[in-house]
Amino acid sequence: MKLWIISLLFISLLMISTCTTESPLAPDTELIVIRGYLYANEPVNDIQITHTLPLGSEATTAPPINDAQVYLIKNENRYALIPSAGDSGYYHYEGTDLTVEADDEFKIEVVYNDQQVTATTVVPQAPENVTISSTTLKFPDFDTMWELRQQGISMDSIRKSMTLTVSWDNDPEALYYVVVENIDANPVEVEQQQFGRGGGPRLFISAPMARGDYIVNAMMMTHLGKHQVKVYHVNQEYADLYQSRNQDSRDLNEPLTNVVNGLGVFSAFNSRSVYFQFLE
């Protein structure tokens, strides 16, 4: 899964890494950049290899590298990744013998133009005790809401009836993010004129958070039907990247990276899912 929140932060990291002049990592020649993410119990297909952005560039995407040798190493076994379709710099593993599970330690190795770049990560545990307060969320009937308000029902009570809460055991040293996605085989779009949300995406991604709950509001929904809520436990490398987003660039001499001889981030995530139906 290609997540826009991760990509946005990664672009910010690249801009910092190529614009600073005091850092020993600001190269005279192009460095290899890894943007690699592993997801527990999912295929390996979110590994991107690029160059750094040139100084003064106005581009928002870095030049891709499509002909590198890319390997994942797990338990001393080497798995060769192959380029994905298109001029994207993405690589994937097409076999079925590579699994990504909690506590697995991975090393990535990239060889390109006599440069060798490496990084390591450990797959975190999945969030514990993920629960949902209700398995149904209903399309609000605004006429009924008005009647309830006329009967003296508080707006707070009405708002609560339009939400459900996803909860999990919070590790105070960890970060989490939540993905809410419509997975109905035949989703029915909410009519724009009725609800103001028609034509929107079927997927919502939260910012990373350091707490143990997330509220799903009916007003954010765009389609009726079955929805999956995935709670992702974020690994430390990504937590460092996210938490450094507010650093003053005048004080940042080196971009945060766990990549040796290059730039970027190589990290892993683990998740658990709950489900609900959004109904009329």
Image (cartoon, rainbow, N blue to C red):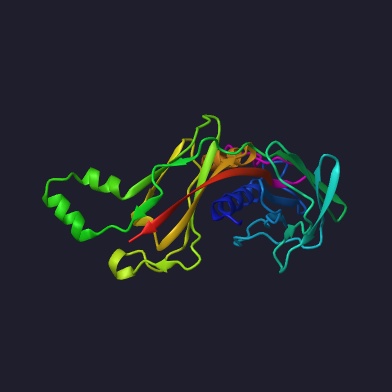
Q: Residue furthest right?
A: 114
Q: Residue at the location (42% across, 65% down)?
A: 200
Q: Residue at the location (72% across, 51% down)?
A: 33
Q: Residue at the location (55% across, 34% down)?
A: 174
Considering the image in quadrants, where does the C terminus appear? bottom left
Q: Is residue 249 visible?
A: no
Q: Is residue 145 left or right of residue 83?
A: left
Q: Is residue 185 left or right of residue 125?
A: left
Q: Relative to the observer, which residue lies in front, 149 or 256?
A: 149
Q: Main secondary structure of the magenta part?
A: loop
Please state the horizontal and vertical placement of residue 266, each as a whole percent of the image.
69, 45
Q: Is residue 256 above or below residue 9?
A: above
Q: Is residue 138 left or right of residue 272?
A: left
Is residue 41 on the magenta stretch?
Answer: no
Q: Is residue 208 left or right of residue 70?
A: left
Q: Relative to the observer, which residue lies in front, 271 or 12?
A: 271
Q: Relative to the observer, which residue lies in front, 220 or 160?
A: 160
Labels in figure, total: 0
Quadrant in the picture for residue 236:
top right
Is residue 255 on the magenta stretch?
Answer: yes
Q: Residue at the location (29% across, 45% down)?
A: 160
Please state the horizontal and vertical placement of residue 128, each as a whole percent of the image.
54, 35
Q: Relative to the observer, which residue lies in front, 25 or 129?
A: 129
Please state the horizontal and vertical placement of residue 8, each as a whole percent of the image.
56, 53
Considering the image in quadrants, where does the N terminus appear? bottom right
In the image, which residues are magenta? 250-264
Please state the horizontal and vertical placement of residue 178, each as a whole percent of the image.
50, 47
Q: Is residue 47 visible?
A: yes
Q: Is residue 117 above or below residue 93?
A: above
